[in-house]
Image (cartoon, helix red, strand yellow):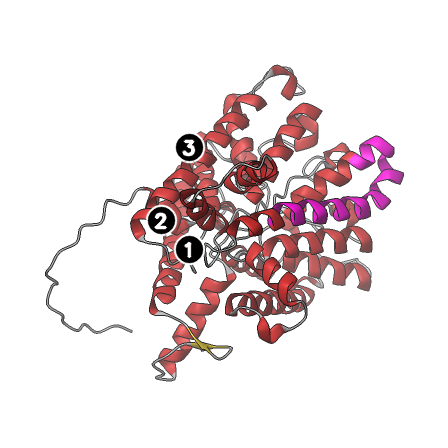
Amino acid sequence: MAYEISNKQPKARKSTTRLIAFGFAMIILTGTLLLTLPFANKSGHGNLFNSLFTATSATCVTGLVVADTYQNWTTFGQLVILCLIQVGGLGFMTIGAYISVILKKRIGLQEREQLQESVNTLEIAGVVRLVKRIVQGALCIELIGAVLLAVRFIPRFGVLKGIYFSLFHAVSAFCNGGFDLMGTEEAYSSLVAYEGDILVNLVIVSLILVGGIGFIVWDDVARNKWHFKRYLLHSKIVLTVTFWLTVVGTVLFLLTENNAAFAGMSPLEKVLGALFSAVTPRTAGFNSVDTAALSNSGKLITMVMMFIGGSPGSTAGGVKTTSMIVLLFYAGAMVLNKEDINLFGRRLTDEVVKKANAVVIINATLTIIATVIIMALQPLLNFEDVLFEVLSAIGTVGMTVGITRDLNMIARVIIIVLMYCGRLGSLSFALVFAQKNTSTPMRQPQEKIIVG
């Protein structure tokens, strides 16, 4: 989770963050144990470390794999992965609270505060109602996506297998999981076989975008319909930035990949490929064109998209759209010598700016450290490929140029830690290890330094 817009007290926030961190760790451990069972693996014997990597990737809705999902895991193993993706995408506290609502159990103030932190909403009022909308809305959207995908998958794979594939990919896309079962045709191929399929491309893209805009935005749109002026500032920023990232990203991929990854495609396939390539790095992990075939410019654009990610309180990872727009407008205010940072007729608080700075700096620092360590461990790997893999892990994206299976044990552990950190949010991850607050009645004397 990210904390760009939270205003909880530090002590309470740390407590809830640690609970969330512990909960995700337990889910990963449970998933690992289930995947190590003999009947979870098609080889008949489970590899503990591969199971841990896969369970972490699924729970953290990343999509990086060390073994093809369809060819390595049995139906039982695939269903375990699907459950981990669903729980990881919506959040275990959200699902637990929804079950409590169904069972008509009372949800106390402390639980409501924890839910507020878990779904990253702005206020505690109405958080239980929001949780109900999140779960019911998610299941409804996933079902609609599955029905649409079934139109294409049932004729290709048969009724039962087609329905199963449709459900799996709808949940994986909405939760920005990136796992696929297309190994039935070719291992690690993702959705390349559907590069020119309008239905599959648009359904997957729509599921990714809806899952990545955040639950607060859903609720805001549901309440205010098409009245954009009534939306929360948060919703206005998220929807505007998401729209422009999608449009600009599509145009950039059309320009950079026309004679590279898109060479030989029809005009329609190029447009679909560009749109898919602009959406999936934020942070779904599917690909409809070979990622390794992207030009250097295309890879750079993809890495920038992966670093930004989706929006707060969503199924996506990254530093989040709000963090980046806050820092851009902060820099603009400094250049123009403006005291306030204003967006859509509202002034941003200093706390939001500080948290956006912290999130971006922590993510960038972890990315640099992880890249340096992996390059030191495996110097024969290309720097660009390692950086791509690291950004994919910490952004919980799941895209790769194909080096995941070439990483040694220590490098894979680093990727596991990055995926876990990316799911919690870099600032949240830091808060887990933060010391208790120490207040002092005295402050150090102030002095200026030269920067810039």
Q: Main secondary structure of the magenta part?
A: helix
Say if the magenta span includes residue 328: no
Q: What percent of the width, then of the height, locates residue 385?
A: 52, 48
| Residue with the mark numbered 3 | 410
Between 325 and 9, the residue placed more toward the observer is 9
Q: Secondary structure at mark 3?
A: helix
Label 2 – label 3 distance at C-alpha: 32 Å
Q: What is the distance, in whole Å, between disc 3 and disc 1 at their CAs?
A: 30 Å
- Name the residue that disc number 2 marks: 13
> From the viewer's perspective, is the residue at label 2 or at label 3 nearer?
2
Which residue in the structure is indicated by mark 1?
Answer: 3
**Image coordinates for residue 32, horizontal then vertical, percent:** 52, 26
Say if mark 2 contacts mark 3, CB within 8 Å.
Answer: no
Looking at the image, can residue 286 be seen?
Answer: no
Look at label 1 and name its amino acid: Tyr
Span colored in magenta: 134-163
Circles 2 and 1: CB atoms closer than 8 Å: yes
Q: Sort mark 3 into few (<14), some (14-19) or many (20+) by Cα contacts within 10 Å.
A: few
Residue type beneath disc 3: Ile
User: Front-most of 278 and 337?
Assistant: 337
**Label 2 to label 1, Cα distance in Å?**
10 Å
* Residue 234 picture location, percent across and down: 51, 66
Q: Earlier in the sequence, mark 2 or mark 1?
A: 1
Left or right of 327: which side holds 382? right
Amino acid under label 2? Arg
Q: Earlier in the sequence, mark 3 or mark 1?
A: 1
| Residue in the image at 43% along x and 60% along y | 5
